Image (spheres, grey):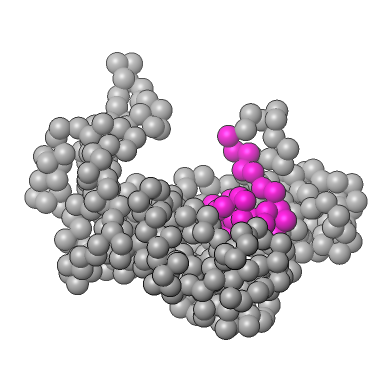
Amino acid sequence: MSDLTADEARRIILWAQGLLGADVRRGGVHGMLRRLGAVQLDTISTVARSHELVAYARLGAVSRPKVERAYWHNPAQSFEYWCHAACILPIEHWPLYAFRRRAFRERRYRWHEVPDHVDTLLRQVRDSGPVTTADVGGARPVKADGSTGEWWDWSDSKIGLEWLLDIGELVCTRRVGWRRVYDLAERVVPADLLAEELSDEECVLRLARVAGRSLGVATRGDLIDFLRLKGRHAAMLDESLLSGAAGLVPVNVAGWPAKRGQAGAWADPAALESQPRGRHRTTLVSPFDSLIWHRGRTERVFGFAYQLELYVPKHKRVHGYFTMPVLAGGRLIGRVDPAREGTTLVARQVSLEPGLSAAKWAGAIGDALWSAADWVGCDAVRVERADPELAAHLAAGVR
């Protein structure tokens, strides 16, 4: 069993996540997607949408249309499904989620009762071709006064389409105006992938390898969180780790909790052999980036206690609405709450982590702000609120 220092583990993690070294940029956006295994989707757009920010953090100022084309392309190179959350996944991973499609089919319920007319919806897609929710009655029901319900109050047609996506009859491989386009899996998933039948055990085993490669070094809880496994599927993960079938090797990381005689974590052998070197990325990090999915892991790896305050009442927020961590020098050094006003990137609040020197780190925060501004077409940066010492050091760079 290998022993790693906390610094060694952190460098391996950053390399695995494509945030350390130049070689991690090979393959562009789709290469990055294969490296990460999953990129989370979210509707919020302050600087840009999260799936764009994830690519930007690793690849730099790749154009946003190029990012979109790489994710949603014809023929399909990726598809949308449930991993850690709603994610873009490499199309070659289609067979690996058969266990989840079967589980949804058995349950016949997720957030809503499945309507009776799903077979009619499926026939409509088969006969007329790809559809959006607008083609089948809209995403939300219309009330008597002409208004629509809240975002979670789906129409029966939306529920039906999502159910058919959950069980693998339909698939989303592209979007139009941020609306999913639903098509028959048999029309867009390559035939060899569609024909591959894996058992639940094989699905979980192979996904454990995917998660292990993406995370570099991970506890059992980190892997569970990446894949959102429960019950018997979590037990399958445990078996694949203990038997060695998952291909991950046991390691102990200094400072990470571990039971006596047992591995505290698991590592991708290729990551252990990589001896990661090269330049660290300096960048803003999306709250939905897989680097920080697991908040306990984020604190364990980076000593960074992070909460997204999006759903916290405004008067109770400490750092802001959509606080983005700042990555520099292989550390999470601070936080920025960004917004856009025309061609100005606004940092509504900026803060450094306790104990860090503003004189040393303000330049990195300024670089992260200006780089993001340039990427989204802003020609000015304005900092609205910061600690006086940090504000003074930022002022020259921001001006």
Q: Position of residue 110 (x, y in %)?
A: 32, 38
- Quarter where residue 6 is shown: bottom right
Q: Position of residue 227 (x, y in %)?
A: 43, 56
Q: Is residue 201 above or below residue 168?
A: below
Residue projecting furthest to the top: 144
Q: Position of residue 115 (x, y in %)?
A: 20, 32
Q: Is residue 114 above or below residue 208?
A: above
> Is 304 part of what is drawn in magenta?
yes
Residue at x 25%, y 62% (from the top left corner): 199
Tell me the magenta residue range: 285-311
Along the viewing direction, whichever of 63 and 133 lies nearer the viewer: 133
Quadrant in the picture for the N terminus: bottom right
Seen in the image, is 123 located left or right of residue 335?
A: left
Seen in the image, is 223 located left or right of residue 278?
A: left
Residue projecting furthest to the front: 261
Along the viewing direction, whichever of 304 and 258 lies nearer the viewer: 258
Residue 365 visible: yes
Q: Position of residue 307 (x, y in %)?
A: 64, 44
Seen in the image, is 87 located left or right of residue 327?
A: left
Residue at x 82%, y 46% (from the top left corner): 386
Along the viewing direction, whichever of 33 and 376 lies nearer the viewer: 33
Q: Looking at the image, how many numbered discs can be counted on the residues?
A: 0
Quadrant in the picture for the C terminus: bottom right
Residue at x 31%, y 69% (from the top left corner): 92
> Is 185 part of what is drawn in magenta?
no
Residue at x 18%, y 55% (from the top left corner): 184
Residue 91 visible: no
Along the viewing direction, whichever of 138 and 98 lies nearer the viewer: 98
